Amino acid sequence: MPMTWSSKLQLPRQAIKAFLLGCIVALAALTAGARSHALPPWLSAVVHEPVPSYPASTVAVVLFEQKQVTVDASGHVETLHRMAYKILRPEAHDSYGTLIVPFDSETKIKSINAWSIPPTGDPYEVGAKEAMETGISPDALYSDDRQKILSIPAADPGNVVAYEYVQQERPYIHEKNWWFQQTIPVLKATFSFQLPPGWRMNSHWVNYSESKPQISDAGNYAWDLANIPALPHGQDFMPAFNAVRGRLAIEYYQPENADDPVTWQSLGLWYANLTKDSRQATPEIQQEVAQLTANAPTTLDKIRAITDFVHSQIRYVAIEVGIGGFLPHSADVVFQNRYGDCKDMTTLLSAMLAQIGVKSYYVLIDAHRGVVLPDVPTLHVDHAILAIQLPKDVPTGNLYATVDDPKLGELLFFDSTDSYCPLGYIPASLQDNYGLVVTPSGGELIKLPLLPPATNRLMRTAQFTLTPSGALSAQAQEVRWGAPAEELRWQFLDTAPKDRAKIFESFLSTFLTDFQLTRAALGNLDLSDKDLTETYNFVAPNYAKQAGDLLLVRPCVLGEKELTFDSEKPREYPVEFPTSTLDTDQFSITLPPGYAPEQMPPPVNISDAFLDYKSRTTLVGNVLQYTRSYELKTAVVAVKDLPQLKLDFQAISRDERELAVLHHVSP
């Protein structure tokens, strides 16, 4: 199926869950009459496969997976999928008791069947008659992306559930991925790839040791894997699932192109030819650009006026049919409709910039860092943004999302779909990530920059007053820009104004067991090019603790830099933060009169390749002052550096919990 290059704008996860739950409930009636039939031979051969002993957290195990791909001489592809699971725990029911198979106008489902096999008694079978068909793109105005949902009965502990389906397609790009690693163990997995005479292929093993295929004289390549370990899930700051998941990536070629393998350059050329007529500017577009830039004195001002227009006036809406998963609508159509998906909005922006003499290029990228790799050319990506070729007269001081390319010059990357990410920035998920820059002469893979920590800033200040009874009253202020501002804007603007106080309360509840929010306000919420400000007041009746003539106070009242490590199992994968950042806290706590320091928290000073952290607690008169800075200098910390990172965060956690001990001095 063609991929959909779409933005991050999605229905809330709860809405998607509710939709799928409704589908499953409706399917229950259909599957109530599941038939009892003999099992197919492949399933009979694996259903009694012995299962090793696994940790109690293992909810299921894959007994057998098979993917069989056959390419005919015209380029049509038929793929057979087979899977058999052994259910080990009740929690597996929701994940492994439902089969969802996508299709569209270019991909057909030839057959679909599923089985449930209890340890004793007859198996159950369901098929196409019991399947429900629904749309698959909740944020699309119209899309031919569809899916069949088949509920498999009795997906209960001790039972085996299995399915088999066949898809037929005519792909635009000759690539295939075999994603064989899952979040549960896999006992056996097989993959076969049948090519017509004269066709050739290249293969790339990603995140897994290479396995050599068995090759037949008829052009069939076959791989067998066994005992594939489960990928961990639920760990803090894991990389994207598909960035660490084992897979086999394949590119294949027709006879006339058999000596011309797929490269980033050739993929870019294919897309450049596909889209060469999409960015023609009509008189209406030219007039709009003229009006937008009439009072803009500099080239940068003109660029900003145009990018602001696309952000504010073009809605994200997807309309994808067939090749529309790749091909954007023309700039004129997007301009007239005032909506489009990521590649549509990027197309219009590029056409408008051309009217002020500024060149720009499509950038095809995956919004999950680490999925696209330099040595595995692919168009299986999910997003499109723009690389703006900056003229010499444009100052780049505040344009942080730039790369100085030896061929194309200074490129400024810009996401047309993210209206909370202003010109000069790019969303955190695109930073330190690879994108295919498409030029008329072909493609070039470029690594987008990780923005400096100071561009992703949180400054928190607070003034507290402590009463003799231990009650704390607070006036707090926060200023954010860059990624911290973008993240919080999404959260607040996705919440009804009447419910926004709950976001403040949820934040405070992390640090305070008893408190009352008395005031909360936001500044510049709708102005993405301005700092986002928060002010909030609260009271916490029992914050400080009395112990005789001692007063125990935690100076780090607010804020948490949390990263937990499993003490029993070493971490196997890197830690991946959203982006670099610089956070500072400055707190002053006015104490009741008559207290002197008994024991003060020690200062903390951490500095290494990935972060700097400093904190200090002092008593000046009757004011307890706490200051700290936290600078995260990288997005990804390699496995070899995790022992040091663990020590860093243990020290930070101790600092956040430290108490200042003060004793009462007699007058």
Image (cartoon, rainbow, N blue to C red):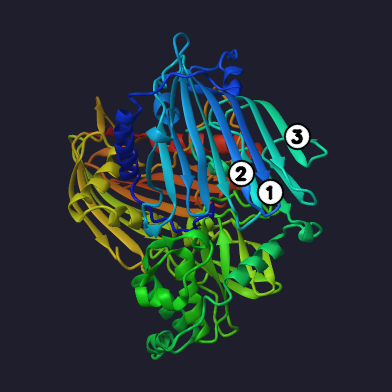
Amino acid type of the residue tagged 3 in the rendering: Ser
Circles 3, 1 touching at the beta carbon (< 8 Å): no
| The image quarter in which residue 26 lies | top left
Is 500 drawn above or below residue 294 in the view shown?
above
| The image quarter in which residue 362 lies | bottom right
Circle 1 crowding by C-alpha within 10 Å: few under 14, some 14–19, many from 20: few
- Front residue of 140/384: it is 140
Mark identifier at residue 655: none
> Which percent across, then down, holds residue 108?
51, 47
| Image quarter (top left, top right, bottom left or bottom right) of the C terminus | top left
- Mark 2 / mark 3, whichever is N-terminal: 2
Mark identifier at residue 78: 2
**Residue at 39%, 56% in the rendered image:** 9
Amino acid type of the residue tagged 1 in the rendering: Asp
Structural distance between the alpha carbons of marks 1 and 2: 8 Å
Circles 1, 2 touching at the beta carbon (< 8 Å): yes
The residue identified by callout 3 is 211
**Residue at 35%, 73% in the rendered image:** 337
- Front residue of 28/282: it is 28
- Mark 1 / mark 2, whichever is N-terminal: 1
- Front residue of 659/647: it is 647
The residue identified by callout 1 is 72
